[in-house]
Image: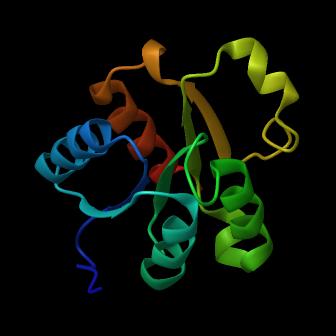
Amino acid sequence: MTTDPQKETVLIVEDEVSLRGALRDKFTREGFQVYEAKDGEEGLAVARASRPQVILLDLMMPKMDGMTMLTLLRAMDAWGLRVPVFVLTNLGEDDKLTMKGILDDSFAYYLVKSNWSIDQIVVKVREAIMRP
């Protein structure tokens, strides 16, 4: 995987093919280098290899769920501890209270899929990249 140093980079970890494709297409049109994975296991491997600036992470996936991937990512090294992760989920706002660690992680953002447009997600990702 070669990364263009001039491009912002994002990893999309999403098992829903149509949503992953829509996110990929939008971020590509916005000038991002896009990496993709269909589950947490593949996502962790791609994250280790590509070291994207931001990760979009679904929670409910086969093989390895998003919470497990996030936990392993945060334990990996300094990069894994600080890379911004947007947790994309169909779970409601009330469910985030039960997600141990998410609320205490200053580099994780919780987005309910139905509440956010892809354009808004791009804006949030760019804000996270600019954050010191």
Q: Residue furthest front?
A: 63
Q: Residue furthest left?
A: 29
Residue 37 can be seen, yes or no: yes
Task: Give the vertical position of 39 relative to 98 (above or below).
Answer: below
Task: Give the vertical position of 114 relative to 80 (above or below).
Answer: above
Measuring from the top left, give residue 46's x and y in whole percent. 45, 75
Decide if residue 108 is on the left or right side of residue 36.
right
Measuring from the top left, give residue 85's x and y in whole percent. 58, 50
Residue occupying image coordinates x 64% and y 75%? 79
Residue 107 can be seen, yes or no: no
Residue nearest the observer in this picture, 14 or 1: 14
Decide if residue 2 is on the left or right side of residue 125.
left
Measuring from the top left, give residue 119's x and y in whole percent. 27, 27
Decide if residue 99 is on the left or right side of residue 24.
right
Residue nearest the observer in this picture, 102 or 46: 46
Task: Give the vertical position of 45 relative to 9 (above or below).
Answer: below
Residue occupying image coordinates x 73% and y 78%? 76
> What is the quadrant of the N terminus in the image?
bottom left
Residue occupying image coordinates x 61% and y 41%? 59
Residue nearest the observer in this picture, 45 or 122: 45
